Amino acid sequence: MKRLIAHGLMFGNLIEVSSPALVERYNRALKHLTGKTTALSDFHIDLSGYSPEIGDELGDDLYLNPNGANRQFILLSTAQKDAPLLNIKFSTSRGILTQFIATNEAQLFALTARDAVAGELQNSVYAVDTPAKLFDIRQVTIEADTIGGHVADAGKLAKLIDRFRQEPDGWRDDVLVAEMIGLAKKTGDVTRVPIALPAMTFEQQNFWTSFFGGVYIFRDVRFPGVISTLDWHSLGEVPVAQVMDLTHRNQIADWLERNNLVEPIVQARGTDGAAILRQKMDFILVDAADRLGLDLGDARRTELRKIAYRLGSSLPEEFLGLAALLRWVEAGGSWPKITSEHPAYFYTLRAKAGKDRDLVNMLLAELSPMDVRQMFIVHKELFYAQYATWSDRKKTYVADFLAREYQVDKEGARTALFGPEPGMDELQRPQMAEGPRPVRRSTDAPVIGPWGGRR
């Protein structure tokens, strides 16, 4: 992983904590949440306040998320909203935390100037010990306060002020006045500078979780479904009619099409489909050459073309399928018959715009694992796990490519590949459609794509 760290592709954009005052605040928050403290004088934290250095010190990478279901967080600065979120258990956690900070940024800026803010992402379950428990998670509520309880004290002071104003002899109540003065010393003048940090609740209908090997749950779609990374039988009884795993290519393709969740890259508006296809083909060639122990040279496209010539009839089916589609795009060749049974099928798709865009792209990254760029952008947990299994040749190529082609313009790369970012309001509770939703089981027949339809 040293290559990734050196290029800023792992643990990049973490917030440094090195001043004694901030370390002391962090320790107070850590003690408050976990009963533990750190002896480190400097460390780095992510969006949630998790520190990989403290995780190593305590021998516990989940010290802020002990059961995996209710993540705790420590905010020392609103700048944490731009930091990555490490050790993700639910795909919705980052969006919820960033929206919470963005919505309350002015209040959090004032509060973190005087103390650390600590809180929790509260699910309706306290432990996920069976797959069925995942379906009990419907909402996530986020609550926070300073370690000194400034928000709670401000609420108490506001009520006392109302009481003081409403009671005719309130100014004679020495106990009331003394209590107001004592709280005001901590909170300041809440009549001029109100302090409020209301709880926020988010729907969690569609999400990915790392529990049980990795599970995708889609409930807020026309045809609900569950997709498991492991064998679908491992989920046991779950309250969704359509349960699949990654080996069910035809069923997944049919389900994606019926829910209108994907579109062909070559038809996406404002996208250079040919350039994306060529890059995917390069990744596939690198993987094939690495498996055969072939020298990648400088891994430029001219070198990769020579590798393609050497492989000849041994070229991967994924490469041949994308090459046929590229000929159709650039030279007006015949339309290739790429069904969902073809290994190249899911490489030709991207998620449609909408609130579930990133989640669907995560799923597509699992179904097209040689596209290392997409995997790194949308599914870092899978990328890091796969990276650890690669040879030094492939590690070097991928790290250099991502540093050269992605790090320099992350936003531009994401927009070029997946379209504009979803709006922040799309993370809020969706309006549910009225009336019953039709349920239809997926066919086993291959799906004609990437335009869709069946034989």
Image (cartoon, helix red, strand yellow):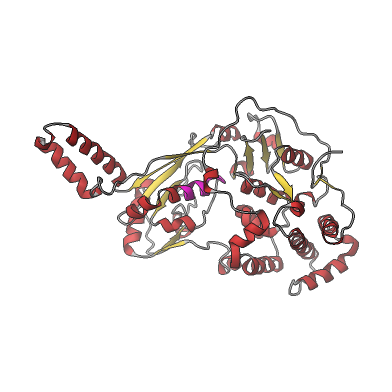
Residue shown at 62% from the left, 44% from the top: 356
In depth, the one of 44 and 81 nearer the eye is 81
Instruction: Judge whether residue 224 is colored magenta.
Output: no
Location of residue 153 by image quarter: top left
- Residue 51 relative to residue 328: left or right: left
Most extreme residue toward the front is 270
Most extreme residue toward the top is 435
Task: Answer above or below: position of 408 versus 50.
Answer: below
Residue shown at 55% from the left, 44% from the top: 426
Q: Quadrant of the N terminus?
A: bottom right
Residue shown at 33% from the left, 52% from the top: 111
Q: Position of residue 82 (x, y in %)?
A: 49, 58
Q: Quadrant of the C terminus?
A: top right
Most extreme residue toward the bottom is 298
Q: Position of residue 203 (x, y in %)?
A: 52, 37
Task: Answer above or below: position of 292 versus 303.
Answer: above
| Number of marks | 0
In depth, the one of 349 and 31 nearer the eye is 349
In depth, the one of 228 and 174 nearer the eye is 174
In terms of secondary structure, what is the magenta stretch mainly? Answer: helix
- The reply to whether residue 389 is in sight is no
Task: Answer above or below: position of 380 versus 407.
Answer: above
Provide the residue span drawn in magenta: 90-99
Task: Answer above or below: position of 319 versus 204.
Answer: below
Residue shown at 87% from the left, 68% from the top: 309
Q: Position of residue 245 (x, y in %)?
A: 71, 40
- Residue 92 relative to residue 37: left or right: right
Q: Position of residue 133 (x, y in %)?
A: 56, 33
- The reply to whether residue 94 is in sight is yes
In depth, the one of 322 and 69 nearer the eye is 322
